[in-house]
Amino acid sequence: MPTMFSTVRTTCPYCGVGCGILVTPQDAEAATVKGDPAHPANFGRLCSKGSALGETLSLRTRLLAPRIGREKVSWDQALTEVAGRFRAIIDEHGPEAVAIYGSGQLLTEDYYVANKLMKGYIGTANIDTNSRLCMSSTVAGQKRAFGEDLVPGCYEDLELADLVILVGSNAAWCHPVLYQRLLKACQGNPRRRLVTIDPRRTVTAETADLHLGIQPGTDALIFDGLLHYLRQQDRLDFALLETHLTGYAETLAAARERAPSVPATAAACGVPEEDLARFYRWFAHTEKVVTAWSQGINQSATGADKVNAILNVHLATGRIGKPGMGPLSLTGQPNAMGGREVGGLANQLAAHLDLERVEHRALVQEFWGSPRMAERPGLKAVDLFQAIGEGCIRAVWIMGTNPVVSLPDSRQVRAALARCEFVVVSDCEADTDLAPFAHVSLPALAWGEKDGTVSNSERRISRQRAFLPAPIEARPEWWILSQVARRLGFGEGFAYESVHEIFDEHARLSGYRNDGERQFDISGLAGLGLAEYDALQPIQWPVNARSPAGTARLFATGTFTHADGRARLVSPRIDDLRTKLSADYPLSLNTGRVRDQWHTMTRTGKSPRLSQHQPEPYAEMHPATAASFGILQNSLVRLETMYGEAIARARLTDTLPPASVFMPMHWSLSNATAGLVNALVNPLTDPLSGEPESKHTPLKILPWHPAWQGFLLTRQLLPLPALAYAVRAAGRRHWRFELADHHAPPDWRAQAQVLLGYPNAALADANKDEWTEFQDSQAGRYHCAWFREKRLMGCLFVDSAALSQPREWLGSLFLQDCLDDRDRRSLLLGKPLSGQDPGRTVCACFGVGLNTLRCAIQEQGLDSVQAIGHVLRAGTNCGSCIPELQ
């Protein structure tokens, strides 16, 4: 463990870009974070989330001791309870009655031990992961095409390509470091073009040379049309088709039938014919083409087919495995790739071996020396929790993820866990939405305390190095799993004393009886000493005797991993989502991420600057849609599907089709009483990949008219009030709550004091506490503030004009130890009498607000993003705010 104030090279815990960072701990809860200039994923650049990592290390909300129920117990008691309950259920109901549900937040070594325990010792493949929700369609599509789950290219190809196509990817917000690498490469090169394909015109599309706003669900059709067009223009590589590919005749025939012409395809996809023709011409006449995709492709009931439709055009034209060309999957989680390497999904084996092949099962069992081996694929995520609800799975161990928030049809998931006989939760946070369902809670290490490896989207393995000591009784997942395995009687297979030993075993297995049959091979990293492992530099696999320095690209020779060495063209299923809408549910719900938040906000929600850009749940819709339902800009709306309901703030925009509504995924019941989007999402899955359809659920939307609405700012961290609508966000030295309810209270002062946690009359100190208020009952207006020795403790604003109150300026008053009379008058009025309200945060990296930007532009005559950056620094770090600055 490094000493305090020493700088540690490690990796970012957010998206699959896998940025290297330099961390210098200041104390147990604070650190300075910079991008690592030497890391080949980011070369020193960080996004807003990565830059704010030092603000997320608080121990205040951490789970710091094992619990049985709500009672703190020793590690020995907790581990004995877990092993004893699992053993009893296995003995009575068989190994198929237990399961593990993991996370792309786990390190590769943690994943490896979990997979080994379940598949090789307990003897069931019921181990799946939340990576199923974001990239399993890519796994299925790549395995079907190539014979193995392989990403052929690397990030450098984005910079070398002359045409980059982003499909279902808002990279400016979700992979901002890669997006900035791409934009930088475009500067000064008139040959380079960027095309975005997405039903939403996201901020990424704002900088594209061409945006194709397709109808939802037509992604595969647009690439089928491209394949047929390339055939018509004699742009296919027929020598490659004949010698290295199979299935091409059927695939080309199907493409011709479904997309017979550019006009027909354009009409079916809902895009202008001239735009589609331009895109097809660019692809046909540009050799160096990269097609990158993310969740807009993956999260679909036909996601694997959409992936294959993209792979088809690259395979059929030979645009694969060479510098500046190829398909590139952009994964959502920091170690989704690492989990795939060790068989973290229910239908995989470790080292890219096939669970359904007898010889592969025998190979792994022989290497492990394990007593048994799972003989068939386990239950995928959605099916797994349905089986829990049906009582088929009686014990589940959930690690580092929050399925009651992230899985579709979350109401059913909660009901299933409430009925489950035994639920174990390993987590670093104490009070998540999942915590109440845990019979045993185990404190895991958080990002800054973990040691091991991760693999990013370009197959690059990087070291995750701890820079903070383990707090109190928190432990790494590999240790927890090994201790339970020993108590189950599997001590010989889990005698690990360090994470280095696990990595070495993982590397040796990858090369075991692997004579080039599998591309995943890191046997060149086997046998590393502890010091060499600690010093391991980022490297792309395969890493073996043939490629000791790693491998940037695959398939350059045209040889693939199928037994015959040929790749497969696959004719995709085409899904017309428009047919699934109805008079009762006439709209399509699309879900996704926002720029400055991550998953369920257990980490990013601790950062005040990350919470300012999008502080509450919202529903984006076209103005025509809003008008037809009587919805106004910034009003509250009620969203309903067959599965549940939610309340969000309406945002009117012409950046998405009239029949579509977009709502972010990050809010849980821990920070928003009615903002859980997966309460709405249907549990339909891709039959091949098992990935849920998170981009389309039939929806209806209605205005919601609360009796009152307002907001509260408080110095104390308070629980969410039991109101119909309540949202909590972090501020600098305060917390912000957006509030609304069906009924107005009879006594506003009493209600305000309850909301603010104000001491009751028996506890209040007249010499310290002061309460000031203003009320206009006829106008429905109530303002109040609580001071302690002239220090602002909290304030509440209930007002028909509450949305216009300057939250950022009011929040800045909490930074002062004493408010003078002028500030107190300003506070009660709800507006500054002097000075500038910075306005809504636009640049989270440097905390630059909308009003500050407008003032600087007007007063200093700023006429470009570069000029803004020179004066205010906005847009000069991760660049994800640049489209908004423009």
Image (cartoon, grey):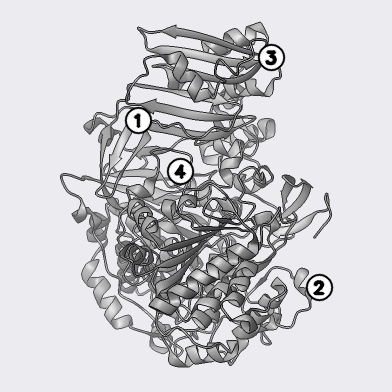
Query: SS at mark 1?
Result: strand
- Report the residue that reaches farthest toward the left: 583
Which residue does the numbered mark 4 point to in the structure image? 667
The answer to whether the residues at label 2 and label 4 have Cβ atoms under 8 Å apart is no
Q: Nearer the viewer, residue 282 or 857?
A: 857
Which residue does the numbered mark 1 point to in the structure image? 636
Which amino acid type is marked by label 4? Answer: Trp
User: Does the image show residue 285?
Assistant: no
* Earlier sequence position, callout 2 versus callout 1: 2
Task: Please identify, in this view, whether the residue under mark 1 or under mark 3 is nearer the observer.
Answer: 3
Which residue does the numbered mark 3 point to in the structure image? 789
Instruction: Tell how many labels.
Output: 4
* Earlier sequence position, callout 2 versus callout 3: 2
The answer to whether the residues at label 4 and label 3 have Cβ atoms under 8 Å apart is no
Which residue does the numbered mark 2 point to in the structure image? 531
Q: Nearer the viewer, residue 620 or 648?
A: 648
Query: SS at mark 3?
Result: loop
Which amino acid type is marked by label 2? Answer: Ala
Q: Residue placed at 30% from the left, 77% from the top?
A: 251
Q: Is residue 92 above or below residue 218?
A: below
The quadrant where residue 872 appears? top right
Q: Position of residue 677 (x, y in %)?
A: 38, 46
Distance of label 2 from label 1 (alpha carbons): 57 Å
